[in-house]
């Protein structure tokens, strides 16, 4: 068993679903907070956009990490100190590391930069269409309740999506969660494919054509789920072959 890899992957499907659920609720709240702040502050259109982007990105990320933050606070104190001490001691025990098949590899600065140079732009690009499709229903149901520009209410998704995608991929790379990277990338690619296949032909105007909006959202969600599942299975198959070889 490769202990380092098992620890690095982290989290299971149920935990990920909970994290995404909390993140969605936090994003909805952040969108409304941005509308309230922009309306009360009388901000100009460019300021509206960046206010919305900043608040939504922060809310989404904090929502996604809420469970882990809560668990860290709950498990702090003596238990945390004891666990950290044990991990530190094990990391210095070369025989233990060899028994667990942990290779203490040190990547050069060039390879480290290359990893992030590949994953961060990929996360940003794949988050673009997801950001657009995520912002549309918020605009329909909440955007008209605030006095802000249409660009802030609707177009901010084109900026927020890539920002969150880049952050998520950077974090997963840092934690060596390669299975989650593959699954997430596949799901986001599916959403992008669903968007291109459904929204463009419909010439979707989310404010006036709500029926087409939900059709497009359904297509994107289904495409994302199918593509994410396929990507996950392919990754598991490849890893299984590596293990047996």
Image (cartoon, rainbow, N blue to C red):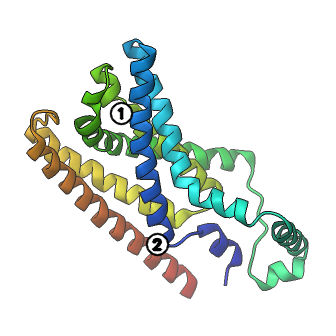
Q: Residue at x 72, y 59 (%)?
A: 73
Residue at image location 24% in from the left, 51% down from the top: 193
Residue 75 picture quarter: bottom right
- Whether residues under marks 1 and 2 lie with C-beta atoms below 8 angstroms apart, the answer is no
Distance between mark 1 and mark 2 Cα atoms: 29 Å
Residue at 49%, 82% in the rendered image = 241
* Res 158 quadrant in image: top left
Q: Is residue 121 visible?
A: no
181 to 243, vertically: above or below:
above
Q: Dot 2: within a 10 Å radius of its alpha carbon, few (fewer than 14), some, or many (20 or more) residues?
A: few
Q: Residue at x 48, y 45 (%)?
A: 60
Q: Quadrant of the C terminus?
A: bottom right
According to the picture, the residue beneath numbered tag 1 turns out to be 158
Q: Callout 1: few (<14), some (14-19), or many (20+) C-alpha neighbours within 10 Å?
A: some
Query: Is residue 7 something one can see in this rendering?
Result: yes
Q: Is residue 185 left or right of residue 90?
A: left
Q: Nearer the viewer, residue 25 or 16?
A: 25
Q: Position of residue 142 (x, y in %)?
A: 29, 36
Report the side of 25 relative to 148 (left or right): right
Residue 175 coordinates in the image, percent (x, y):
64, 59
- Which quadrant holds residue 30? top left
Classify mark 2: helix, strand or loop: helix
Tell me which label, 1 or 2, sits earlier in the chain. Answer: 2
Residue 223: image location, x then y, percent: 24, 59
Relative to 50, say whether 131 is above or below. below
Secondary structure beneath label 1: helix
Q: In front of the other: label 1 or label 2?
A: 2
Q: According to the image, label 2 marks what residue? A: 14
Which numbered marker is on residue 74? none
Residue 102: x %, y % from top left: 75, 75
């Amino acid at each position: 068993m490769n202990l380092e890899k098992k620890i690095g992957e982290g989290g299971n499907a149920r935990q990920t679903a909970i994290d995404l659920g909390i993140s969605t609720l936090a994003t909805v709240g952040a969108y409304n907070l941005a509308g309230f702040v922009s309306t009360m502050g009388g901000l100009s259109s460019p300021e509206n956009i960046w206010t919305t982007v900043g608040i939504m990105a922060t809310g989404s990320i904090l929502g996604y990490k809420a469970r882990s933050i809560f668990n860290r606070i709950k498990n702090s104190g003596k238990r945390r100190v004891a666990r950290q001490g044990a991990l530190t001691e094990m990391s210095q025990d070369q025989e233990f590391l060899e028994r667990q098949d942990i290779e203490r590899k040190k990547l050069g600065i060039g390879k480290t930069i290359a990893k992030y140079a590949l994953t961060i732009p990929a996360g940003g690009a794949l988050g673009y269409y997801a950001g657009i499709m995520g912002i549309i229903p918020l605009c329909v149901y909440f955007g008209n309740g605030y006095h802000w520009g249409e660009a802030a209410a609707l177009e901010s998704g084109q900026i927020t999506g890539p920002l969150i995608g880049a952050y998520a991929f950077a974090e997963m790379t840092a934690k060596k969660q390669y299975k989650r990277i593959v699954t997430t990338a596949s799901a986001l690619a599916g959403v992008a494919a669903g968007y291109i296949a459904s929204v463009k032909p419909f010439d979707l105007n989310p404010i006036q054509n709500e029926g087409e909006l939900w059709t497009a959202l359904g297509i994107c969600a289904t495409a994302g789920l199918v593509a994410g599942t396929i990507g996950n299975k392919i990754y598991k198959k490849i890893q299984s072959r590596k293990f047996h070889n």
